[in-house]
Each structure stands twice: as structure tokens, then as C-alpha cells.
Image (cartoon, rainbow, N blue to C red):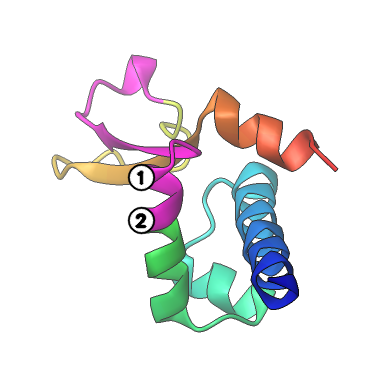
Amino acid sequence: MVAHVSKKKEVNKMFKEIIQAISNSPYLSKKEMAKQLNIEENLIEQIFLDLLRMGYLKKEVCDSSCNTCPISSFCAKTDSKIEYWEITSKGYQLIQSN
């Protein structure tokens, strides 16, 4: 039981670190984030999917309507659709909790 609680705390800490990294640098690639946090890139991908499933993140797609896009100042304004992750209010609550 103690090992389970400890593992849960470690996972929760990792979730917080990733959400905090997104909050600090919203344009950070998963590859850059993996390097910064010293976590394997494939694990970052899995954690993003977990955070999405649990409601801490949501996946958005820029539809080229730059005037309403939160990443318009960053992107190359191409015709391609750009996917990005947005922190939900639940995600912000997680990083603000102790």
C-alpha cells in the first residue's frame, strides 16, 4: 500500500512538472520538454495523453483564423493546421495545489 501511495505521488509530481513547463513555455516542443525535464520523449507523449484523458489539458487545432488563435504570434501562419495543448482550469488547479 505504501509503495502504491509513493508511486501515485511521483506520478502526480511528474504531471505537475509537465503542466508547469507548458505554463512557463507554451511553445516548448515535446522533445525540448523531455530534454528539460530529463524524461524520455515517448513517456512525455504518454503523459500528455493521460493529462488529456484526465481533463488537465485539452488539445486544440489552429484553423488559420489568426485573430482568435492564442499562438498566432508564434506560428508561421501557414495553411497547415497546427495542434497545440492548452491547460484547463483543472490543470491550473493541479499546479497550484500542494
**Helix, strand or loop at mark 1:** helix
Query: x and y percent of residue 16 in the render?
Result: 68, 52
Quarter of the figure that contains the C terminus = top right
Start-end of magenta stretch: 50-69
- Number of labelled discs? 2
Measuring from the top left, give residue 2's x and y in whole percent. Answer: 75, 72
| In the image, residue 92 above or below residue 37 | above
Mark 2: secondary structure: helix
The residue tagged 1 is: 53
Q: Residues within 10 Å of mark 1 (few under 14, many from 20)?
A: few
| Residue 9 disc label | none
Percent coordinates x, y for residue 80 in the rendering: 15, 45
Residue tagged 2: 49
Residue in view at x 65 percent, y 42 percent: 23
Instruction: Tell me the residue at 36%/56% (across/down).
Output: 49
Residue 35, relative to residue 90: is it above or below?
Answer: below
Look at label 2 and name its amino acid.
Answer: Leu
Left or right relative to 82: residue 3: right
Structural crowding at the residue carrying mark 2, measured as other residues with C-alpha within 10 Å and reported as few (<14), some (14–19) or many (≥20):
some
**Mark 1: amino acid:** Arg
Tell me whether circle 1 and circle 2 mark residues in contact (CB < 8 Å).
yes
Q: CA distance from mark 1 to mark 2?
A: 6 Å
Residue 80 lies in the magenta stretch = no
Residue at image coords 32%, 23%: 66
Q: Is residue 68 magenta?
A: yes
Near-viewer residue (2 or 28) = 2
Q: Residue furthest top?
A: 67
